[in-house]
Amino acid sequence: MAVDLLLGLQWGDEGKGKIVDVLTSKYDIIARFQGGPNAGHTLVFNGKKHVLHTIPSGIFHDKAINLVGNGVVIDPVIFKGELDKLEAQHVNYRKSLLISRKAHIILPTHRLLDAASEASKGKAKIGSTLKGIGPTYMDKTGRNGIRVGDLEMSDWKKRYRALADKHESMIAFYNVDVQYNLEELEAEFFKAVEVLKSITFIDSEEYIYQAQKSGKTILAEGAQGSLLDIDFGTYPFVTSSNTTAAGACTGLGVSPNKIGDVFGIFKAYTTRVGSGPFPTELFDDNGATMSRVGNEFGATTGRPRRCGWLDLVALKYACQVNGVTRLMMMKGDVLSGFKTLKICTAYNYKGDVIAHLPYNIEPENVQPIYTEFKGWNEDLTEMTEASQLPQELNAYIEFLEKELEIPVAIVSVGPDRKQTIFRD
Ligand code: GDP
Ligand code: IMO
Ligand code: MG
């Protein structure tokens, strides 16, 4: 069976966790393929909210296998925290959770390096979640990293020490104020590593290959969003992994010709957390309403998310880069009550009107050009059928479908599992 992908098309937090949870009953395996605990994926069901950072969003279903793929970076301390929470909910993850031996480990000093790097950048800081993501991927590509499989080797602590010592000298080199007590951090880290080692480690590319061969259904769960991709995002204000479809091939060991559906997920408006350009950002009451009604605060850091109108130019770009086959529109309910809605359909780029995403979308180069839509007043949150959706919302969706030439298969009308409308 081909592997289906679910990816964020904006700057993250599109609602990936919710939809993966909704779709899990259709899949045998849910696999994360990149990113790490910079992700915060929220699931809501039975009146309870759950936030996952490293563990795939299928974990609350009894039958699905949840795989942390080779492309993911794992912080054992955060991972242990996630397991503790699952245990408190009586979720039996022992048999359903697997970790790739080739996934890289985030060390305490990676987190410190992240903080030092950001502090040294001053105003130009990325707005990183400070989870050590960048430094860990740097060690991966620099061929210095420690992988999950290394934890099964006898000499890994020697390698750990050498790497942590090197990191300490790098932190000193930054010459910024980063306070830490490494002894304490290491005590917590080594304890968490022992917990991590109680989970089953596998050669995941072989596992995935055999699963595909035997007809198992697999859904790959993206983290972050396409505009945070290390190659195709708004560099340098991006994360350090390929968040786009190709990342699923390298992050799981799936060949490109074995990719099936690519589900592209987006909010009916746009949000961004952290620094970087955001052409349709709003600084007025409309933005404040999106933030308040949408409860736009980061699931990992609690930071307020910047809000703005939907950017179709950027969305088109993300659909192209990913080869999206079906769209999922989230948080339509948040737009109820807006008299007029706007979608950015082109940019004014240095005096020219363009409809593609240029190299640089900083405000001095790019001003959004909007098409206006009539809003709706109906509360969507109790709706369960596509036929109940207001006509104005249908017009909004149909416009996007026509422009993107991709069907909108799901409209989400609230955070709960049940607040999900299937259109096909
Ligand atoms: P992810 O990182 O893509 O999984 O998304 P996050 O969990 O970081 O952020 C999405 C937020 O929106 C969470 O608080 C969800 O509970 C919430 N959410 C998801 N879908 C909807 C929706 O359709 N309507 C509303 N109002 N909230 C939603
Ligand atoms: P999910 O999976 C939203 C952002 C950070 C920062 C930039 C780099 O929940 O959608 P990093 O910690 O990777 O060095 O941060 O990327 N960022 C996210 N924004 N959702 C996420 O994940 C994010 N993961 C990272 O805010 O701007
Ligand atoms: Mg999130």
Image (cartoon, helix red, strand yellow):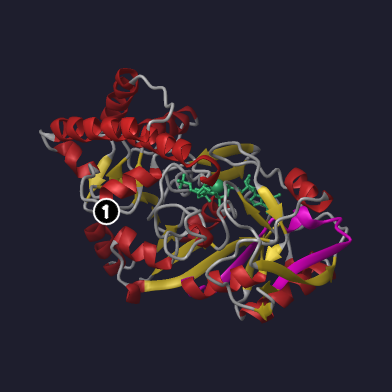
Closer to the camera in the image, 153 or 18: 153
**View extreme (left): residue:** 154
- In the image, residue 140 above or below residue 404: above
Name the residue at 60% across, 69% down: 315
Name the residue at 22% across, 60% down: 206
Residue 236: percent from left, percent from top: 47, 55
Q: Quadrant of the C terminus?
A: bottom right
Q: Residue under circle 1?
A: 141
Task: Please tell me whether residue 338 belongs to the stretch shown in magenta.
Answer: yes
Name the residue at 72% across, 47% down: 294
Circle 1 Cα neighbour tier, 10 Å, few/some/many (<14 / 14–19 / ≥20): few
Residue 198: percent from left, percent from top: 27, 33
Task: Please tell me whether residue 57 belongs to the stretch shown in magenta.
Answer: no
Residue 108: percent from left, percent from top: 33, 31
- In the image, residue 186 above or below residue 41: above
Closer to the camera in the image, 273 or 410: 273
Quadrant assignment, res 183: top left
Q: Which residues are magenta?
A: 322-345
